[in-house]
Image: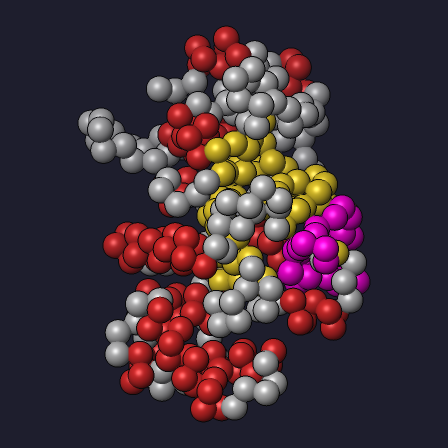
Amino acid sequence: MSAEPLLSVRDLRVGFNTEGGLLQAVDGVSFDLAAGEVLAIVGESGSGKSVTAQTILGLTRSPNARIEGAARLGETDLLGAGDEAMRSIRGDRVAMVFQDPMTSFNPVYRIGRQIGEAIRAHRRDTSKDEARERAVELLDSVGIPDAKRRVDAYPHEFSGGMRQRAMIAMALALDPEVLIADEPTTALDVTVQAQILQLIERLNRERGLATILITHDLGVVAETADRVLVMYAGRVVEEGTLEEIFYDPQHPYTWGLLGSLTRLDRERPQRLPQIGGSPPSLLDLPAGCSFRPRCSHAFDRCAELPGLDARLPDAPGHRDRCWLDLETKCERRPS
């Protein structure tokens, strides 16, 4: 794995002017991503995961958007690049697999034509026959059987899992450096979820991709991610390696996410544990820690906003945003 980050995001802030005021969707997100690394961004719906990824690709630019911070792909300033420059970057250097495979393709065009169109938009000297041949190779590489025949199929002739594989094939068409997979297993059954995650892991390993995996389910990233960012209400509340987040989590919100997973090594409970309450409105965040109204461990100091700091002496790369001292965390953290 390269020591130098391929993608570097610093203090990213994304807000949208609405009738109710400024909606701060992303508030101070920072991370580095190296080639061959998988970074998982985890959190409930509305936590800012997708907005972070879409902003990197320039998809949140609009008259009512307020974007601050920095995002660099190598030497390229992604936030400062013009619209024409971003069009050349999307798909070519940074590709994205969107959330819903059922609606990601145009239903009236064949799968191969849509993949070929993406190729020819960036490689204008590519003929239709060459683009079709490349589409067959890509479909075969992501595990679609009989790719030479299926390349001429329409989206409705593919199952949900096959469509997601085809979306991944399209994303890889131009050999990008960074792959962003936004909830790639949504609406898929458990067996197909596992196949898609194994596919992403294999492609990451074989191609040396820098991969961002966005999900609300920590179980999805258990065997795929190298590092994890846990987001809540637009902010990162905990970050660390996969092992640190799973075996030594430090933030009560992370405890709640892990606690909601089914454990096969324990008796089946009558009801799965859940995090009480609902995420706050981004137009009216509570003072201090945003998770405070839902946290059973909150105390007076939580009315102040904690910094995202390294609090474990033996894990300087692990950071969390919680005022509880280490002894109290060890006592209260669910086993």
The question of residue 226 being in magenta is answered with no
- Say if 51 sits above or below 261 in the image: below
Pinpoint residue 66: horizontal percent, then vertical percent: 78, 52
Horizontal side of 50 relative to 205 (left or right) equals: right
Residue 189 appears in the figure: no
Foreground: 320 or 17? 320
- Identify the residue shown where x is 54% and y is 38%: 229
Pinpoint residue 54: horizontal percent, then vertical percent: 62, 57
Q: Which residues are magenta?
A: 55-76
Residue situated furthest top in the rendering: 327
- Identify the residue shown where x is 52% and y is 32%: 240
Horizontal side of 271 relative to 246 (left or right) equals: left
The picture quadrant where one finds residue 139 is bottom left
- Say if 297 sits above or below 238 in the image: above
The picture quadrant where one finds residue 234 is top right
- Say if 172 sits above or below 45 in the image: below
Horizontal side of 130 relative to 61 (left or right) equals: left
Foreground: 150 or 301? 150
The question of residue 74 being in magenta is answered with yes
Pinpoint residue 35: horizontal percent, then vertical percent: 53, 50
Q: Quadrant of the C terminus?
A: top left
Foreground: 155 or 173? 173
